[in-house]
Image (spheres, coloured by chain):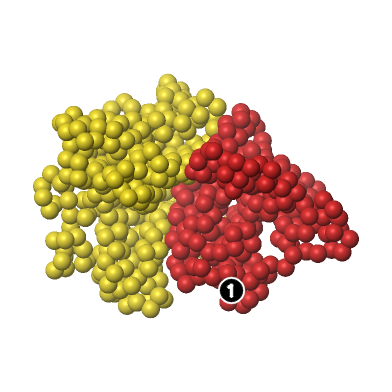
Amino acid sequence: MLKLEKRPQPSKAWVWLAPVVAVIATMIAGGALFALLGKDPLVAIRTIFWDPLFSEFAFFYRPQLLVKGAPLVLIAIGLSLGFRAGIWNIGAEGQYIVGALCGAGVGLAFYPMEGWFIFPLMVMAGALGGWAWAMIPAVLKVKFGTNEILVSLMLVYVAEQLLASMALGLMKNPEGFGFPGSRNLQQYPSAHNAELIAGSGMHWGVVAAMVAVIFAYVLMTRHILGFHIRLTGEAPRAARFAGVNPGRLVLICLGLAGALAGLAGMFEVSGPAGRVSIDFNVGYGFTAIIVAFLGRLHPLGILMAGLLMALTYIGGEIAQSRLGLPAAAIQMFQGMLLFFLLAVDVMTNYRLRLTWREVA
Amino acid sequence: MDLSSINPILLLASLMVAATPLLLAAVGELVVEKAGVLNLGVEGMMITGAICGFAIAVNTGNPLLGVLAAAAGGAVLSLLFALLTQVALANQVASGLGLTLFGLGLSALIGQGYQGIRPPSFPRLNIPGLSDMPVLGRILFSHDLMVYLGLIIVTAVWFMLKYTRAGLILRAVGENHEAAHALGYKVVRIRMMAILFGGACAGMGGAYISLIRVPQWTEGMTAGIGWIALALVVFASWKPWRVLLGAYLFGGVTVIQLNLQAAGVAIPVEYLAMSPYLITILVLVIMSADKSSAPASLGRIFHASR
């Protein structure tokens, strides 16, 4: 019978092979799912993974890759720092919402004044908002030892209610004929996160995502803080002896993750989304968890995983309109990807051995 | 605002109804955590149970079959988690999150054709004499069967954990899996069974929401109740009776909040709707001072090397 044997060192090859195997396995299982729904699996897979990049209408979809990928990468980079240290912030969705509310709030407060300083102020407000929202679980964890998983998640629901209250009340467009939702920031030049190169999908959020990737790479490989984060994740006791302050690490990791998620929300509300509305958040904060794991919690891996996940979003939308594939199918597809990755990952730390005798 | 429109008897009666899904999910998760496994996928299993139960109840016209299907649906989904964490030795936190994301997608997919349908109504208990008692009859003895099933499961779990050999073994596995393994207990098999039980309970809890409490199907309708159930286990310090207490407390908060909304209190609806989540956080903060009662092997991966 087959038996697992622990490897002395995690396999370097499998660390990077696992995501590839997981993606292929997801395509096969997803194809089977689409076949069950009565769609041609090959056409569905091609529509999701190939058409957004290489079909005749690809010029229309390619910019979307950056628009959808940027928030995912920004959030996932922040999450990966904490995940590396065993700090589980799963409330990025809430931090994303609060960042967007703070950013948009600053922008709307200045309306209709024009000035170069408004957008930078909004960026700062967005980051601060996300940071503050993430500080709630962080401080509670450090002060009282409260579980950060549950607190950060509860705050997502609180943030969603806050968003609804803002869209219906304080931030409602006074010229909106009573409809919920704020003024459109796309029509307010000083606050608009416009495309930097027309038709490319490149906006300030994409730039921020790139900077975050480089920053995280340097932090994790060259800086003492990155070393402390990895040490805490791999050997918490050793980290304690090495003088790592676990409370400080919680505050830094959650704070950075919150600030990046807040930035992502702020760039989204002032650019692609344009306004604060009840259904502003579309689950980037949760998908980013998958992105972080798929990218092996490594900045460059996250960049690639973020683009792949953005591709499934766009491909999913195309498949929805062209093949009538339900929107939920693509959500399930993304969940499946995380499952396969976790399952395949066993090969990174263990190897299979054939044995004859059953071990109790 | 008219607080006199709130009827205290109906309030207490609806408290028991509001607490039941939480109670079912939390007591299932309690058994899972007592076995040393942290399954964060409660929300995903609940929503899957909600739609499985709803679909079967609508198609067969029998709500009891729906509840059974919900338990099966939740258990099948939890089997995925069991395979990942017990066989493939994956990280339990990540696997649980994956289970929730997957369950939300799966339920939305199954539930496409079921929006706006009313499920067959659930039979209410009617005990002549008891149900007709003036105040207590309405509060305690005129609910649907599921309310009592929840109470029976809590009692059974309490008895099993405290007084039976099976309960002792389950706790041993959760406290120290190496020692339990050395004594010859099949750690993986016991944990698998605990996870399946937790999945079935969460599934039934979900079905209670879609079949009785709402009763309708909408995407993402469990709205964090699975996560509150997880918090409840911490609140209860892993003790079944305190799960019951906690479930009624949270049920009470939900019901009072809804009643205040209906009575037209000056606080905006959104802020009232936040309150169950905020109170959960508050309770977690108070309870997290005492960590001694958590099972010692909670969340740790077991790999039999010898």
Q: Is residue A323 left or right of residue B157?
A: left
Q: Is residue A206 visible?
A: no
Q: Is residue B22 above or below residue B77?
A: above
| Placement of B83 over or under B119, stated as above or below | above
Q: Nearer the viewer, residue A35 or B125?
A: B125
Could one spot residue A328 in this view of the protein? yes
Name which residue lies at 75% across and 49% down: B9
Q: Which residue is mark 1?
A: B58
* Left or right, B66 with reference to A114: right
Q: Colour of chain A?
A: yellow
Residue at the image point whose x is 48% and y is 54% from the top: B100
- Quadrant of the rendering where the C terminus of chain A is positioned: bottom right
Kindly indicate which chain is depicted in red in the rendered structure.
B
Q: Nearer the viewer, residue A182 or A23?
A: A182
- Provide residue A218's location: percent of width, then percent of height: 24, 33
Element marked by disc 1: helix
Instruction: Give the residue furthest to the top.
Output: A243
| Circle 1 crowding by C-alpha within 10 Å: few under 14, some 14–19, many from 20 | many
> Residue shown at 45%/33% (left/top)?
A235
The picture places residue B88, in percent across and down from the top left corner, at 48, 55
**Number of marks in the image?**
1
Considering every residue shown, the one lying at the far right of the view is B129
B203 w.r.t. A102: above or below: below
Residue at the image point whose x is 58% and y is 77% from the top = B59
Please state the chain letter of the residue tagged with numbered disc 1 in the rendered image: B
In front of the other: A81 or B1? B1
